[in-house]
Image (cartoon, rainbow, N blue to C red):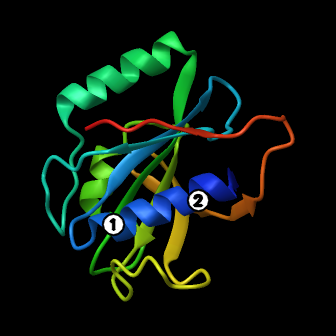
Amino acid sequence: MLRIDRASYDAIVAHARRDHPDEACGVVAGPEGSDRPERFIPMLNAARSPTFYEFDSGDLLRLYREMDDRDEVPVVVYHSHTATEAHPSRTDISYASEPFAHYVLVSTREHGDQTGLVGDVVEFRSFRIVDGVVTEEDVDVVESYLFGHSPTTVVYD
């Protein structure tokens, strides 16, 4: 099960809506070994495509070095689908390289960039993808973690 705080959930959904009609992508990092997503890191979709996402290689290298320096791992790897359901495509499955990450997909196919909508109107689903095997998991959105600190946001331009 993916347990994610409301601020990170809202930030992922807002990023997906903002980048619509292109796919959005990013990471939520957390302390190594914790399985707790804490630091929201929206990334640039270098492909700038409504049907495909690709992390900028320079940004990705910088991110992994930074996570290593902070003893973090990518707890959540997320992206959006703009015209299809929130389910991994064959391409998504073939590129999944983090066996311990939660792969979150958000579909903006019906609502796009409608940031003023009230309620949970987007599909937000989480999957584990290991050796090409996709397993959907429940998502538990909590108001905050019990560990006493708030998530942070980093922006790469």
The amino acid at mark 1 is: Arg
User: Badge 1, how many Cα within 10 Å: few under 14, some, many 20+?
Assistant: some
Answer with the quarter of the image where residue 152 lies.
top right
Which x, y percent locates residue 131?
42, 43
The reply to whether residue 95 is visible in this rendering is: yes
User: Badge 2, how many Cα within 10 Å: few under 14, some, many 20+?
Assistant: some
Which x, y percent locates residue 51?
18, 68
* Residue at 39% from the left image edge and 81% from the top image edge: 114
Question: Foreground: 89 or 116?
Answer: 116
Describe residue 89's horizontal placement relative to residue 50 as left or right: right
Q: Above or below — where is 57 with respect to 52? A: above
Query: Which of the two discs, 2 and 1, sits closer to the camera?
Result: 1
The reply to whether residue 88 is visible in this rendering is: no
Q: Which circle marks residue 18 in the picture? A: 1
* Residue at 48% from the left image edge and 58% from the top image edge: 12
Q: Quadrant of the C terminus?
A: top left
- The answer to which of marks 2 and 1 sits earlier in the sequence is 2
Describe residue 29's horizontal placement relative to residue 65 as left or right: right
Describe residue 53's horizontal placement relative to residue 2 as left or right: left
Q: Helix, strand, or loop for circle 1? A: helix
Q: Which circle marks residue 9 in the picture? A: 2
